[in-house]
Image (tube, rainbow, N blue to C red):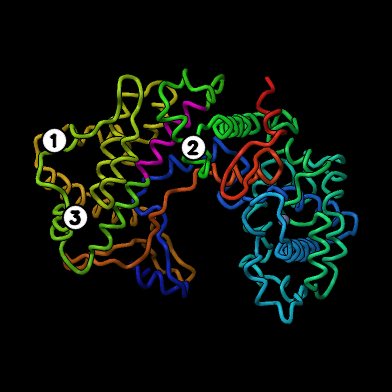
């Protein structure tokens, strides 16, 4: 077994590699978001697809199709839906574009889509099972809409079949064609076949029951309860906001973290999950700071020693003591949490802001209690959590800040190597693979792979998108609001 670090690992795939979770600080946040928004993932942004795939499974049963036949039907319908949605000029709600829509120009000439070519395996999406395989399938199985072998699931009832069929029925004929013209797409869009048009009639009613967790079945009750609680919270937050909501995640953060004690936040009334979200939104802020700080460290790895890397990061900080740095943070005013995490990252972008955010979040350990504190501090020791950080800062209070930061940077470099070794695996040629972003050789550190520094997806934005897709929320001209149907739903006891 030969062992390959970084670059050769990247070479085996033929495309640039992104090392996921290189510091291993984000599993807790990912797990909690999954538990609070079950059935929705970062990429499942369009409600209509939740009905499309199980409905096509019922069609496949009727037609006696095998698995390949089902997948061919799925791909053709997904391509047709994307084409139709691309021709719609008057969307009833602002949603992300249809899945695969941006690939269709490659299969279009003179305003005519080659549907046959576009719907071949791996044509409009890098998954032979289409967006059913790449994106929605697992959620649809989790929700009981499909079985593991792609038959209609226990919660895809006759009612569901009729409801989804009433909205999407005309798609089947269009999907049979070898080609589709722009006019055909326009007509179909006007007749309600765009991704934006799933809110009407029985289809909309069924999708709202699905996403609001009202399809029933004891087996799904815990998942339905969690998703409904988060959806209720999100809908109320948007409804109660004093200013127009342009970012649902920021609105949740402002309402649940920085608006005073949760007992005084009307949107949180009677919802236990509000406290959990308070803890998660703060922990998420810390994880984002770790990711950004690490990216800056990686960029400094240009063939120099760990000490030099650490120095280059440390010298961006003022020459003050750790105590002075921490004591300058204003994180609370009585029992109201102040938005220190937001303020410091605006005032000091880059590594200084990152460390200030981590310090601010560590102070929340003494300010939260109960469920909020548990979620804030989950996997604390293993994932450099806020309680761990509070202990580091306390132990380092009398140090110079630059010296303390340099120690942390050295520690991160060592940690990244350890995490890489723990992820050791064999590739298809039986070569050992250690997925790392930076590599040390003869004491010199170099960047060998990319990583992401964007905030992790908390699934709140995709939840907002599917709630808009089924008519509970509205999203127009960049502003989020609650529909009459949504207002009725949150008013229910
Ligand atoms: Zn539309």
Q: Is residue 371 left or right of residue 449?
A: right
The verdict on residue 277 being magenta is yes
Badge 3 density bin: few <14, some 14–19, many ≥20, Cα 10 Å: some
Vertical side of 4 occupied by 361: above or below: above
Q: Which mark is residue 221?
A: none
Outermost residue, bottom side: 110
Q: Is residue 382 visible?
A: no
Which residue bears the numbered disc 3?
313
Quadrant hosting ligand 1? bottom right
* Residue at the image position 28 percent from the left and 56 percent from the top: 417
Residue range of the region highlighted in magenta in the rendering = 274-287
* Residue at the image position 15 percent from the left and 52 percent from the top: 314
Which residue bears the numbered disc 2?
251
Dots 1 and 2: beta carbons under 8 Å? no
Q: Is residue 343 left or right of residue 77?
A: left
Dots 1 and 3: beta carbons under 8 Å? no
Element type at marker 2? helix
Task: First in sequence, mark 1 or 3: give its number.
Answer: 3
Query: Is the CB atom of the residue marked by disc 1 within 8 angstroms of ligand 1's nearest atom?
Result: no
Question: In the image, which is nearer the foreground, mark 1 or mark 2?
Answer: 2
Which residue bears the numbered disc 1?
324
Task: First in sequence, mark 3 or 2: give its number.
Answer: 2
Residue 63: image location, x then y, percent: 90, 59
CA distance separating discs 1 and 3: 19 Å
Vertical side of 322 occupied by 443: above or below: below
CA distance separating discs 1 and 2: 32 Å
Quadrant position of the N terminus in the picture: bottom left
Task: First in sequence, mark 1 or 2: give its number.
Answer: 2
* Residue at the image position 56 percent from the left and 35 percent from the top: 238
Badge 1 density bin: few <14, some 14–19, many ≥20, Cα 10 Å: some
Dots 3 and 2: beta carbons under 8 Å? no
Residue 452: image location, x then y, percent: 40, 57
């Amino acid at each position: 077994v030969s062992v390959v670090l970084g670059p050769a690992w990247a070479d085996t795939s033929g495309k640039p590699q992104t090392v996921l979770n290189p510091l291993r600080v984000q599993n807790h946040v990912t797990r909690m978001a999954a538990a609070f928004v079950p059935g929705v993932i970062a990429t499942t942004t369009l409600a209509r697809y939740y009905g499309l795939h199980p409905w096509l499974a019922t069609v496949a049963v009727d037609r006696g199709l095998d698995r390949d036949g089902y997948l061919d039907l799925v791909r053709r319908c997904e391509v047709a839906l994307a084409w139709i949605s691309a021709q719609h000029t008057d969307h009833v709600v602002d949603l992300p574009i249809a899945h695969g829509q941006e690939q269709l120009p490659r299969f279009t000439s003179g305003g005519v889509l080659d549907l046959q070519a576009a719907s071949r395996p791996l044509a409009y999406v890098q998954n032979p099972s289409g967006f059913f395989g790449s994106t929605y399938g697992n959620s649809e199985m989790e929700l009981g809409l499909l079985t593991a072998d792609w038959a209609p699931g226990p919660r895809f009832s006759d009612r569901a079949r009729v409801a989804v069929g009433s909205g999407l029925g005309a798609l089947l004929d269009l999907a049979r064609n070898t080609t589709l013209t722009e006019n055909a797409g326009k007509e179909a869009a006007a007749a309600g076949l765009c991704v934006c048009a799933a809110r009407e009639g029985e289809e909309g009613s069924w999708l709202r029951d699905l996403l609001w967790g009202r399809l029933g079945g004891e087996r799904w009750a815990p998942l339905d309860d969690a998703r409904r609680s988060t959806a209720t919270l999100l809908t109320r937050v948007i409804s109660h906001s004093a200013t127009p909501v342009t970012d649902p995640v920021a609105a949740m953060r402002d309402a649940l973290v920085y608006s005073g004690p949760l007992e005084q936040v009307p949107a949180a009334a009677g919802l236990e999950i509000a406290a959990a979200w308070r803890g998660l939104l703060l922990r998420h802020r810390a994880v984002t700071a770790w990711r950004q700080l690490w990216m800056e460290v990686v960029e400094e790895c240009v063939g120099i020693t760990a000490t030099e890397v650490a120095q280059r990061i440390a010298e961006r900080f003022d020459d003050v003591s750790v105590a002075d740095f921490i004591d300058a943070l204003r994180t609370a005013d009585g029992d109201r949490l102040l938005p220190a995490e937001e303020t410091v990252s605006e005032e000091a972008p880059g590594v200084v802001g990152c460390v200030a955010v981590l310090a601010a979040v560590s102070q929340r350990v003494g300010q939260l209690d109960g469920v909020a504190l548990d979620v804030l501090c989950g996997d604390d020791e293993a994932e450099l959590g806020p309680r761990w950080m509070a202990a580091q800062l306390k132990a380092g209070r009398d140090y110079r800040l630059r010296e303390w930061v340099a120690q942390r940077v050295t520690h991160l470099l060592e940690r990244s190597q350890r995490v890489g070794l723990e992820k050791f695996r064999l590739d298809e040629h039986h070569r050992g693979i250690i997925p790392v972003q930076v590599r040390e050789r003869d004491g010199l550190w170099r960047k060998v792979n990319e990583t992401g520094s964007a905030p992790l997806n908390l699934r709140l934005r995709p939840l907002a998108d599917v709630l808009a897709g089924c008519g509970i929320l509205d999203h127009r001209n960049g502003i989020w609001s609650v529909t009459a149907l949504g207002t009725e739903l949150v008013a229910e006891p």
